[in-house]
Structure formats: structure tokens, C-alpha cells
Image: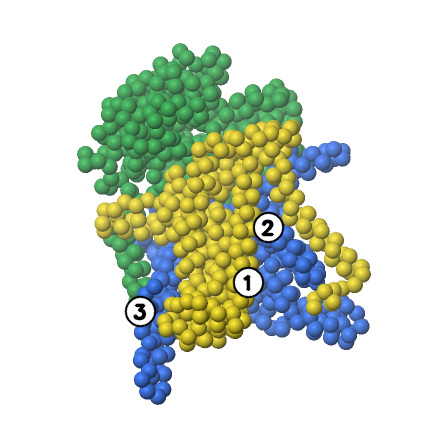
Chain colours: A yellow, B green, C blue
Amino acid sequence: MNEGTAPRGLVDRLLGLNAWVVYVFFYAPILLLIVFSFNDNDNVGIWTEPSLRWYGEMFQDERVMGALRNSLVVAFFSTIVSTVLGTMLAIALERYRFRGRGTLDGVAYLPIIIPDVTMAVMLLIFFFQAFGVLDDLFGVRLTTGLTTIALAHIAFSISFVAVVVRARLSQLDSSLEEAAADLYANRWKAFRKVTLPLIAPGVAGGALLALTLSLDDVVVTQFVSGAGSTTLPVYVFGLVRRGVTPLINAVSTVMLVASMILVGISLGFQRGAEARGQRLADPEGLLEEISTD
Amino acid sequence: MRRTARLIASLMVLALVVGACGGDEGAGTGTTPVEGTGTPDGATGANCALDEVDGDLNFYNWSEYMDPELVTAFEEQYSVDVVEDFYESNEALLAQMQAGAVYDVIVPSDYMVGIMIQNGLLAPMNDTAVPNLSNLLARFTELPYDPGPEYSAAYQYGTTGLGVNVSVVGEDFPHSWALLFDPEMTDEFPGGVSVLNDPREAMGAALKYLGYSLNDTDLAHLQEATDTISAGMGGIATFDSDQYDEALVSGEVAVSHGYSGNMIIGISEAENPDDYEYILPEEGATLWIDNMAVPANAEHPCTAFTFINYILEAENGATLTNWNYYGTPNEAAVDFVEPEVIEFYAPTFEAEGLEVIEDTGDYEINFTDYLAQAKS
Amino acid sequence: MTAPPVTEPEVTGPITPELEKAASKAEARRGFLIALPSFAYLVLLFVLPLVLVFVYSFATRDATGQTVLGDWNLDSYKRLFSAEVLEIFVRSLVLALVTTVICLAVSYPFAFYIATRTPRVRNVLLVLVMIPFWSNFLVRTYAWRVILGSEGPISQLSQLLGGEEFRLLFTNTAVLIGLVYGFMPFMVLPLYAALERMDWQLVEAARDLYADGWTAFRKVTLPLSMPGVVAGSILVFIPALGAYVTPALLGGARTVLMGDYIVSQFLAARNWPFGSALSFAVMFVMLLATLFYFRAGARTV
């Protein structure tokens, strides 16, 4: 429907040109980054000859590998917990009415509009205070580390997951879920067999978002991490401050490729979930699904 | 339901806040983790034996200050991992320590050692575990900020001066801090200049430029220094404590404020070393002594002492100096240091106009505040 | 799988009002329970920290830079209005606004173009936008550091063409480029979503009504896409205002912006009360901006 109303002639050409420029703008830096990671020169900007030297160095660099491992561990836990909590939050807010829903709704939106610097400050002070109190009351001396990082990531990811899942929920016809509720003896089964598959694309999207937020985060992590518990972006950030070498390019390329693969997987999963959801939306499909119990 | 939730939430807040206040008579919240830490004997690592290790080493240091080969050798010899982290200035180090960061070995400068001792942040040096303390030259055992030494072991010493690109600035350049702060000069330099991102060093340089002492405690003078830096902001390309040497030899800046050893190495590795010079301005510069110390809340104090002992060995001390071109306080190491390196740092203590940074007590925080003001 | 803890009231007779009330109460309780874990988590790790920041903003800093939770005062807030802080704030505000405007100006035609292609082309174009979006933010910003360096490709190019070394790194322009680059996808996606969801029949009708396409656009398309403009603007303006990573990488510690200023209060500057006041103030401004945007967006439709 849209394409019929596309502007004609010159305007369309100009728009097309603009689009091209934007794509070049988006991709040129990334491509340059990748290309120069294969550079044999110590100096990042000057091209000498192609080599895999920096990739070799990267895989042998304990700090890099350690930081990578930390990032993955934190991202894993953060994504799972925040996806579960976020989905539950979304369902509660969208499908139920209870006292305090309004306040919760507002509170749930705050982490989205809060700048990450403020979030970092909040959590730093929180952990600092909490550890102090725990020490005074119980003599237990905790320190910041991977756990605090994961807790922090979950804190800001829940809301994002909730928003995505809510968007999906609001698009659904709730009568489907009601029908399922009538047909199934208990709510949980109705949820598992009908609602969950229907919102699966949303949940997947939310999970991907939580994963990306965790892997991307610099400031919050920097404030709540401890010695030896750096994550990859924070480590790269520190490296850049101290000296720019193609090693960083190599690390960056790996991070880029990894995120692209992740996106690919997630999109594929979302497509699959979408298809399944379509099947359920059709009354016959729904009936079939329910009868095969 | 909502009311209950609110009640619980407010109770939690109250608990945290009250718990903090009641904790230590308003002297600060969880600020001195020293209390009740360490072994039953009281001091952290008091029971460490010679060559004992109790886990991996968390090493917090200035950047480009420790030879990676020494680190690797230590790791292999003692079968532990060394995790290195870096800070830009003593104030950044102090901030982290106060916020509760846990490290095993840190490298504060002279005045900072004094401040940390006063705030109970350091563990006493364990003489049994660090016998190589006897390798130190006499003058490094009776330092004003830590006589003994009781809490630290001298690491390296050097000066802070200017790296100058002679080909850009001209042969006849004034040996003065004006190279950093005089807009008439700096505006002409392609790329500008780089100043250390360090409150005492940056403000100190400006104070010296104005003819005052580094340790001047007159706020009016400090304000003058701030104004000088602000006036020169047009020519200041960046505040950098890590890359000042690379910035100079890569042509990013024409004049670079930095530490002696790193600057000299950077220059010697440049394509045209003769284009650059390291100078000490006539108005005076900083002479500093860095020291290894073990924080009171260190989790692996034995490894820490073993590491310090390791660095204080004659040959290792020499390796370190040969690598970073800073002065070694290690008498036993001198025999193994290369002559050209000795030549470079030997005159340090005799040079004129050099001042050591001192702890100015309650006034100290102003340096940080005024530098922030100057930058904005 | 076990049944949920709340049981339905048994229906043994006609549906009475009491039964309905009991049912809806059970409903509400179930909803609350489902929301409870997230609610508890958010209260503990979000609301509580926020309150703490607020509390800290009234605390004092002692001579060694440590925070004293006593001697409550308004010093930190008073300092918010000092010339130094206002300058930094205005600078950050202007930078964020310019970033938002540039993003909008470039993204709107871009999103419009995509929205008016055939579905197949649209999907491809969208995926091509998503890829940079999902790539690591730090890495994308770092790329510019390399490009803009005085030994980077642009510099080499300009030297080849006879000009002098290109020095864009460590300037405000570099930061602006970095911000626009980093946040443009946040503008494109909401805009596209709004444009795609529009009822294009209205646009066609407008085309017939109005003599030229431009008026049709101005009178119909633009107002209808306003929600997207608002959403995109918020998603760009807010992070841009509090940006830390981009100015740190590309700005050279020379120009101080709000993000870095706040962070430094918790690092070398060791002034947690002041840093807390700043954080709170920034958040407050963003809340206002969000409300303002929403009102503005709502009015035009």
C-alpha cells in the first residue's frame, strides 16, 4: 500500500541518494575497523600489509580472554533473569488489574529514560552503602564483582524487556487467551500452550535487547565492577585510553561478528515463533493445538 | 497491597541509611575498611612468610610502568596470575581505595603514601616477607612521608617535565612552562599541547609558572593558576596521563607534559629522535618518588609481599629501570643498570629547582576541585 | 507443572455478584503475584538506589574526599547554579539538541524512503539498518577514533590531496559526529515504525486534495508520523545529554560535558554529594524533557 504513494521522480531520487549516503555513513567506519584489524603495522592508521598477527595476540592475551569470559557470563545470567522478570512484569501490567498497577507502570518506565551515568551512580552508592551496612551488622565483607555487575545489568534490562513484550501483548487478541483459559483446567497450561507461543517473538526480541544492553554496557559496569572482574567493553575502553593499536580492532571485529551472529539467530528464532503464533491465531490451529495435549 | 509494599520499601531505605550513620560516628560511611580486617593478629599479612603466596595478585599501577616480562617471570616463578589495572593519578587511586576497591599492591607517590597512612588505608610492611627492603639506598629508607619505611617500599623515582618537538617549536625555545600555558605560543603550535590529567601535576605546573611553590596553600594563588590554565585552554589539545609520549612523537601535539622515563623512551623509539627533547623548565618542576604498598583490605597480602620482595631483588630492580628509564632506589640493582640509563637519571637529585609534592592536609582537595574548574 | 497458588472459587450455582467480586479479587491477586518478583527487584535495585542518591546529595564531603552522612546541607544544589556547572550543562544541552536535530533531519527522509519501498526491499533495508544498531556501541564509536586521528584515513587522504593534516579528533565536532553516528539508529527505527503503521490511504487522499506532494506531506504525513518523531527524539536526546563514552573517546578530556563531569565526581574529584546532586538534576531535566516531548507530540495530532 505504501509504495503506491511513494513520491515521484526527482524527490524519490534524492531520497534514494540520501539513503545511500546514510548507509555508507553507517558501514564505512565498521568496515574500516575490520580491514585495519588485519594490518601488520603497530600504528592503526597506516596500512602496511595484511596479517593475522593481532588475532593471534588477542587469543593469547589473558586479560582480553578473561574480560570476554566475564562479559559472556554476566550477559548470560542477566539476559535470562531479566527476560523472565520482564515478561512477567509485562503480563501483569498488560493483562491484569490490581492496586498499585499505576505506580508500578511508572516505576517500570524509569530505567528506560534514565541516563546510564545516573544509573551507574545510583548503583555504586547502593552497593557501597549495602556493603557497609552488611559489614557493620554481620561482619560480612562483600566486594563488587561479577555478581554486582549482573545485578546491575538485570536492573536496567527488566524494563526494556517489559516494554517489548507489552508491545507484543497489546497487539494480540486477548480473546484467544480467554478461550484457552476456558478450555484448559488451569491457567498455567493455558499460558504455556497459548499465550507463551503467541508472545514468543516479543520475548525473543526482549531477550535480544537485554543481551545487547548487557554486552554494550560501559559506564554502569565500570562503576560496579571490582578488580579482576572487568568486562570486555570496559576493558577495551581502558585500552583505548592507554594506547590505540590494531589489537583493539581485532577485538572489535570479533565483537561485531559475534553480535551479528546473535542477531541472526534471534531474528531466525523470532520468525519461527512468529509462524507458530500465526498458526495459533487461526481458530482451527488453536483447536488443533489444544487437542494435542 | 500497595501500602504494604511502600512500607517495606521505606523500611529498607531507613535501615540502610541508619545503619550507615550508626556505623562509625559520622566519620564517613564504610570508609575505613581497615577496622576488623586482616588476620586475628590485627595487621593484614602479618603472618606471611618469605616467598609465600596466597592467590593471584591484583596489581594497581600507573600505566606503562611495569615491565611485562618481569610480570610474566613472576607469574611463572610463583605459579600465580597477575591481574593489572591502571590509574591516571594519585587522586584517582585514592578515590578507588575510598570507594572500597580491593587490590593487593598499589603504587602511590610520595605525598599520597602519607595521606593513605593517615587514613589507615595501608598495611604495615612485613619485614620477614620482604627482606630485600635492605637493598634500598639509605636516602629511601628515611623518607619524610614514611620513615622506616614502615608501610611502603620505594619503587622508582623521576621528574615531570616537558617533551618538546624541536622541529616544530624551533631550536631557540624557552625552557619554561610557558610552552604549555602561554596562549601566544601554544596557539601557534600545530596540534597544541598535552597536559597531564593529574591535579597536583597540572596545578603544580601552573603554580610554578606563576612563581609559586608546588605546595602553596593560598587559595588566591590557586585561583590564579586556574585562570592561567583556563586562559591557555585554546592551545591545550588534551589532558592525558597515559599517552603523552605517543602523542608527542606521532605529531598529535607539539609539546607534551609528562614523566621523564616514559618520555625519553618514547623519544628514543621515534623515527627522528633528534627532533625531540625532554626538558625541565627553569621555573622548577616535580621530583617524585613512587612506592609500592599493600592496602589494608588486600585479599592476597602474602602474594603482595612476595611480589614487592621480588621487585626489590637486585637484578629485577635493574631490569625494571632498564625498561622504563626511571631512577632505581635499589642500591644492589645499580650494578646491573645500563650506563646510559644511569646517565639519564643520575643528576635527578642534584638538579636545581625541583620540588617534591607534599601532603597539604585539609587543603589537598582544592587541587582536584580547581583543576576541574579550569577544565570546564 | 503445579497449579498456580491462587485457586478459582468453585462455581456450583448461578453467577452471583459476590462470586464475580471474589473472582475479580482472585484475578487481581494473581496479577499482583505475577508482578511481585519484578516489583521487588525494581524496588531494591532501582527505587532504593535512587532514594540513596537523593539522600547523598544533601550530605557533606570531608577534607579527604569521603562522604559524611550528616551535616545535611544544600551546598551541592547551590553549586548546581554556579557558572561552572551552568556552562557545562548548557554545552551538553546544546550538543544534545544539535545531535537530535541532525539525526532527525537525516533520518526522516531515510525512514520515509524505506517505508515507501516494496515489502521485500523494505525488509532488506531494515536488516541493513539493524546490523549496526545491534553491533557493539563502544566498538562503533572507537571506529571514529581511528578514522579521525591525525594519522587516520581521512588525514592521509587530505594530505594526499595537498592539504594539511586533518585534525578533527579531540574537538567538539568529533564528539558530535560520534553522537550522531551512535544514536541515529534510535531515531530511524521509531520513525520507520510510525511511518509504516500510518494509514497511507489518507496520504493518497491528501495527494488528490492538494495540488502538490509537498503540501500533502506537510498537512498529513508529517502530523501522522509525529509519534515516531517524538519517540525518536527522546531516544536520541536523552542518551546524548548524559553521554559519557563518546566524549571520552573522541573529545580528549578537553571539553567537559555532563556525563564526564558526573563520573569524575566519583573518581578523582571525590565529591559524591555533588555528583549525586548532579545526577539527580540531570535525571530531573530528562523527565521534564520527556513530558514536554509527549505533550508536544500529543498536541499536533
Q: Which residue is mark 3?
A: C5
Residue at 42% over, 65% down: A192
Query: Which-is-in-front pick, marks 1 and 3?
Result: 1
Q: Amino acid at mark 2?
A: Ile
Callout 1–callout 2 Cβ contact below 8 Å: no
Q: Which residue is mark 2?
A: C131
CA separation in Å, label 1 and label 2: 23 Å
CA separation in Å, label 1 and label 3: 33 Å
Q: Chain of mark 3?
A: C
Dot 1, how many residues are within 10 Å of its Cα: few (below 14), some (14-19), or many (20+)?
A: some
Q: Position of residue B185 (x, y in %)?
A: 63, 32
Of residues B5 and B121, the one nearer the viewer is B5
Q: Chain of mark 2?
A: C
* Tag of residue B90: none
Query: Which-is-in-front pick, marks 2 and 3?
Result: 3
Of residues C82 and A14, the one nearer the viewer is A14
Q: Which residue is mark 1?
A: A275
Q: Amino acid at mark 3?
A: Pro
Residue at 26% over, 23% down: B50
Q: Is residue C259 visible?
A: no
CA separation in Å, label 2 and label 3: 43 Å
Q: Chain of mark 1?
A: A
